[in-house]
Image (cartoon, rainbow, N blue to C red):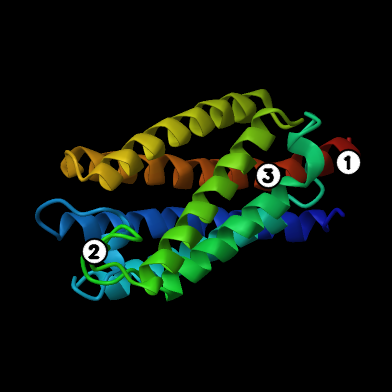
Amino acid sequence: MRSNPILARSSSVLGALAALGAVVVIWVARLTVEGTVYVSELGSPALPTAEAFNAALLVLAAGGVLAGLGALGQRSTARLLGRWSIAASLITSGVAFLVASRVTCTAGCPVPFTQGATAQDLVHVVAAVIGFAAAAWAMLQTAFGEGPRPLRLLSRFAAVAVAVVAAAGGMLSVLQFRTDIGAALEFTAMSIAVLWLSGFALSNAARPLRVTAALAA
């Protein structure tokens, strides 16, 4: 399925702007909080950043869906990665973060199945993990797709970086060891993923222009 080039470009531009706006708000919120906090903790009711963070996460979710709609018809050339479209991965990621923005973690964001954790924490964490995983899969699909070479190289770097950095941060969180480093790693992985999404969307926004120019010539 391929969308109208003009609609695809508009969707991509809006998706890129939404992603950039969301990451700026999240970082501004982080800078207002002293001490060690993980990304999701900014949205817990115990912190004054909850309203702004959850709104930003909702905007980010919309950005993922819009970027996906701007990429309709794009698939990876690798057999396994091409089983479903890049748009499907991004829309799945956006929907997952939509859930995470509405079902926030409780105060302190306890790790699921540990003391103090609730079903709400489990739903939030599962949604966030699915969102990250789907976004990382979209990066891999793009890395081995037919897009511009700079975008493919950027996607390979982003996919590896997000996977390694997020896994390390998550492990430190589960082990409750050096949570300061774990939190910093999580914010780093989040930033890389959001900036990739914006770059991906902007690249797609330029594609219809190139096609139009080629046809006009």
Give the residue type that dot 2 points to. Gln
Q: Position of residue 176 (x, y in %)?
A: 21, 45
Label 3: which secondary element: helix
- Residue 216, disc: 1
Residue picked out by circle 2: 115
Residue at the spot of label 3: 204
Asked if residue 72 is positioned above or below residue 168 in the image, the reply reads below
Which of pointers 2 and 3 lies earlier in the amino acid sequence? 2
Q: Is residue 69 left or right of residue 163?
A: right
Residue 217 vs residue 8: left or right?
right
User: Circle 2 sits in a helix, a strand or a loop, which is it?
Assistant: loop
Dot 2 and dot 3 residues touching (CB under 8 Å): no
Residue 58 % position (x, y): 46, 69
Query: In this orientation, does residue 14 appear?
Result: no
Q: Mark 2, mark 3: which one is toward the viewer?
A: 2
Q: Residues within 10 Å of mark 3 (few under 14, many from 20)?
A: many
Question: What SS does tag 1 mark?
Answer: helix
Does 145 sit above or below residue 205?
A: above
Instruction: Give x and y (percent) for residue 114.
Output: 28, 60
State the separation of the CA atoms marked 2 and 3.
45 Å
Nearer mark to the viewer, of 2 and 1: 2
Which is in the foreground here, disc 3 or disc 1?
3
Q: Is residue 20 visible?
A: yes
Q: Quadrant of residue 185?
A: top left
Gap between marks 3 and 1 measured at Cα: 19 Å
Q: Quadrant of residue 81?
A: top right
Percent x, y of residue 136 = 56, 41
